[in-house]
Amino acid sequence: MTSPSLLWTVGWILTIQQIEENVITPFIQKRAVAIPPVVVLFAIGVFGLLFGLPGVFLAVPLAVDDVLLPGTLQSARSVNLTGSRGRSAKPSLCTSVRYRRTNWSRVE
């Protein structure tokens, strides 16, 4: 027979672990990679089901790639990287990201 204190201890450990993994960690990752926690949890679930343990480890980097890369490519197209002449180029992606993160306004 197991003692009730052992069961309570295991129950508390599992509860704290689940709260940390399913609530706290996604919010920390949101601040680090700038994607919503729901996307992180969804990506971990989907990639975990599809690819197993490697999918769980690669879920957040792949989700960031899927969420941020299309916007980056769209910004690269709007900068006029095609080499056509006669058009004014827009600020580069690095410049716009720097302005967005620091809340500076661009001075012409």
Image (cartoon, grey):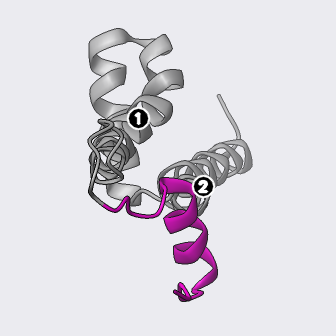
Observer-nearest residue: 68 or 23? 68
Instruction: Give the number of the disc on residue 65.
Output: 1
- Type of amino acid under label 1: Asp
Secondary structure of the residue carrying numbered label 2: helix
Question: What SS does tag 1 mark?
Answer: helix
Residue 107 is situated, as x and y percent measured from the top left of the image, at 56, 88
Tag 2: residue type?
Glu
Q: CA distance from mark 2 to mark 1?
A: 25 Å
Q: Nearer the viewer, residue 59 or 86?
A: 86
**As displayed, is residue 46 above or below residue 30?**
above
Measured as percent of width and height from the top left, residue 1 is found at 65, 28
Of circles 2 and 1, the one toward us is 1
Q: Residue at x 29, y 46 (%)?
A: 85
| Residue at 32% from the left image edge and 48% from the top image edge | 80
Magenta-tinted stretch: 88-108
| In the displayed structure image, the side of residue 107 where residue 47 appears, left or right | left
The correct choice, above or below, for 16 with respect to 44 in the image is: below
Residue 89 colored magenta?
Answer: yes
